[in-house]
Amino acid sequence: MNKKISSLLTAALLMLLLPGCWDRKEMNDLGIVLAMGIDQGKNNMLSVSFQIVVPSEVASNSGKSTTTPVTLYQTEAQTILDAIHKMSLSSPRNGYISHIRVLVFSEAVARTGIADKLENMLRHPEMRPDFFVMIARHSKAADILNVLTPLETIPANNMFLSLQNSSTTWAPTITTQSDELLEKMINEGVEPVMTGIEIIGNRSEGGSKDNLASIKPKATLTYTGMGVLRKDKLLGWMNEQESKGYNYITNNVQTTSGNLPCPDNKGRLSLLVLRSNTDIKVKVIAGKPVIHITLTNTSSILGDGCTTPISNQSDIKAIQNSSEEKLIQLMRSSVTAAQRRYHSDIFGFGLAISREKPKLWAQLRDNWEDEFTTLKVEYEAHSKLRRVGMLDDSILQDLKE
């Protein structure tokens, strides 16, 4: 018996040494932040916006909602970490940032540099690096976070899911996670890009519940163009075609759609990209690097608007040739924009040279920004057409008759 009592007392004393949940936080004390916006404040301060979930609205299953599902807190501070704690001046709950889904920088902040802000944020012990980073176009980041969305109750989820979906089904967009962004900022031979987000409609009414009271919202959010950076500073924007070319070159296209003229140039047909693969090789000609891009693309006819049926091999060959020409045009337009307008190697050509020709890269690395602008790039595209469809003669011919 004495041994048993002794063992129990020893176990009880040992339990006193265990730390337990010393840093536990009650859910009722937390304000869960799902989106953050960074704008330029006064006197070189940062204006930081926090989109926080309103628990009573999200959890409610009955009764008519009287408030919005999220609320927006704003504060000014010298650093993002200071802003998180300073938010307690107006919020009854402590900001909890482990579940952030999107981080939005204003265009003004992005042009001055974002590396210090991003690093400061990621050093917070609660922060996870799997959120998307984007740039607000033609508006403040706070305005972006102030728009309510119809299909997703929480706007941050809407921004996250729509970009995730778009990046897999529409070639001109790309997801940029914070850790990937920092990696490209510090690596040699490659520069980052970020997708832009814009408000369409009446931004002053975007935060009101009236924005969701009609079939067509008064303000909506849309992704538009890719921002080109050098290190951590925004240089400018690529248009839709240039953005699409970038994704083809960097092998980021999973599926997308496009259109081409019909073989007889009467009408247009739509193609659905089934697979796309890009291979980049480095050649050396006369001591100079040459980048050779080979793109292999497999598509099917998604919609046939041609007046004559596509029924023979010559028609299919003509469509494939036209597709290859367009793919090369898209890639060339993107490279031209990066070389001539921005002098920024967003494609990682320098990184490819460093891997395949390290001795040559050692000669180029210190002056790569200038070398990139004159870098020769060769393009090769192979388009394969699958599943041409079961459509017979077009009804357009009958309408004309």
Image (cartoon, rainbow, N blue to C red):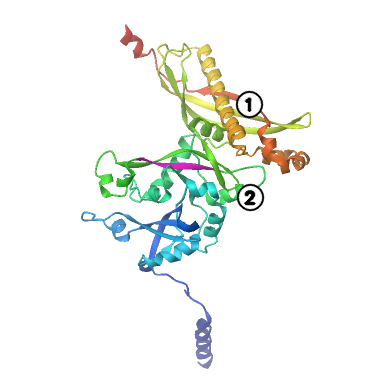
Give the residue drawn at x 47%, y 23%: 387
Residue 299 visible? The answer is yes
Which residue is disc 1 drawn over? 379
Which residue is disc 2 drawn over? 186
Q: Main secondary structure of the magenta part?
A: strand
Q: CA distance from mark 2 to mark 1?
A: 28 Å
Residue projecting furthest to the bottom: 2
Q: Position of residue 132 (x, y in %)?
A: 48, 49
Q: Amino acid at mark 1?
A: Tyr
Instruction: Say what secondary structure mark 2 lies in.
Output: helix
Q: Report the magenta residues as a range.
A: 193-200
Q: Position of residue 25 (x, y in %)?
A: 42, 70
- In the picture, measured across the screen, residue 215 lies left or right of residue 258, that is left
Residue projecting furthest to the left: 63
Residues packed near mark 1 inside 10 Å, few (<14), some (14 to 19) or many (20 plus) = some
- In the picture, measured across the screen, residue 169 lies left or right of residue 210, that is right
Q: Amino acid at mark 2?
A: Ile
In magenta stretch: residue 281: no
Instruction: Say what secondary structure mark 1 lies in.
Output: strand
Q: Nearer the viewer, mark 2 or mark 1?
A: 2
Residue projecting furthest to the top: 401
